[in-house]
Image: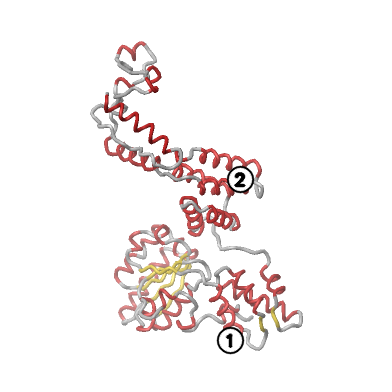
Amino acid sequence: MAAPLAERVRPRTLGEVVGHVSILAPRAPLRVAYERGRPYSMVLYGPPGTGKTTLARLLAQACGQDFVALSALASGVREIKDLEERGRGARDQGQALLVFIDEIHRYNRAQQDALLRPLEEGTIILIGATTENPAFALSAALLSRLRLHGLEPLSAAEIMGLLQRALAAPEGLAQAVDCSPQAAAAIADAADGDARRALGLLELAADLALSSGSTLIDDDMVRQAAGAQYRRFDKGADLLYDQISALHKAVRGSSPDGALYWLARLLDGGCDPRYVARRLVRAASEDIGNADPRALSLALDAWVALDRLGRPEGELALAQAAVYLASAPKSNAVYKAFKAAQKDVQAQGTAPVPVHLRNAPTVLARSLGHGRDYRYPHDEPEAYAAGVSYFPDGMKNPRYYEPTDRGLEMRIAERLARLRQRDRDA
């Protein structure tokens, strides 16, 4: 049985690799390692189908090193120990053992720690591949011994070039089928930056063409091969957090159109809409706050509407909330004030509650002085007891909350300024 098309046309030299200009450009570290035959330990991270395995194989081939490929799903400490012994033997012969570990983020802490000594002693050269952000997926000790290279999804133009090469290659589809420009563009769009998926779709569309007696792949064949459209998205992986971050930052940046785009991307990719609702509620407090207190209520109402209506009807409520939050005046004054208060609490410990602020529900509590000299604000002008401290004894009255001059906070700032003047007068 013939190997899949993606394997048959896998690049045989670094010059055939598509994309990744930042790490493959002349004088870039990975290019230099390839040309000089001196690989180094690294982690290649990025979405599926961006060439992580291919780059590892090309480095091993160019450097003439002994090459071992492992999957983190099917290996552990025992296999690592075996490789360490094998690496010592190679080192004694003036060679290096190049170890490729796919899905390296799936190793637990003990398995990652088992790699530290062979890396430190130079008995292996490690190339790890992961779709996760290494900063979160790998231990600090392991990261300190590796160089990080991020791989981006391939562009539509890069995918198109890859398809043309596969169609022209003797080991590919040369003299078997051709592909219309419209069909190639459709494959590039459906692949969504994944080279492996693009070549798989091309191969399946070619089979459909040949089975129908045609040698030309058209749009209809690509649609049949692609089936249901899908987007790159992993509910537990980096892309989820990148996209939810983009939504939050569009809201913070007062871009309702950007917020709608990222909301649509998240929902299209299969993100749980309740997770989005939770993030919108957070944004309402963190980035809008008292500049427009209605934002928090509207975000919560959207969450309730989503729970009651389900999908897809409830998604419109999320869109309404996202647009309102993005359009509202912004303030992070409450967010900053709360952080400053938390910092003081952590630094100062458990200071006693001043006597005048203590609860006095019983005769005993009152006999102990709880609540003594408490001034009831509603009995004073503007319902404000000027000069009273609401902090522990001996603690200077800190200024945490500084309202902005945007939205409702402008009026809040005016009132607080007037009350603070009364404090100074008192």
Task: Give the percent coordinates (x, y) of residue 56.
Answer: 44, 75
Front residue of 93/156: it is 156
Residue 344 appears left or right of 102: left
For the residue carrying disc 1, how many other residues have a C-alpha within 10 Å: few (<14), some (14-19), or many (20+)?
A: some
Front residue of 95/407: it is 407
Marks 1, 2: nearer the viewer = 2
Task: Give the percent coordinates (x, y) of residue 230.
Answer: 62, 63
Task: Give the percent coordinates (x, y) of residue 126.
Answer: 38, 71
Determine whether 343 is above or below 212 in the image. above
Per the image, the residue denoted by label 1 is 169
Q: Mark 2: which amino acid?
A: Ala
In the rendered image, the quadrant that contains the N terminus is bottom right
Residue 172 appears left or right of 215: left
Task: Give the percent coordinates (x, y) of residue 373.
Answer: 30, 16
Determine whether 288 is above or below 31 in the image. above
Per the image, the residue denoted by label 2 is 317
Residue at the left extreme of this rendering: 394
Instruction: Kindly indicate the quadrant of the structure image that contains residue 355.
Output: top left
Helix, strand or loop for disc 1:
loop
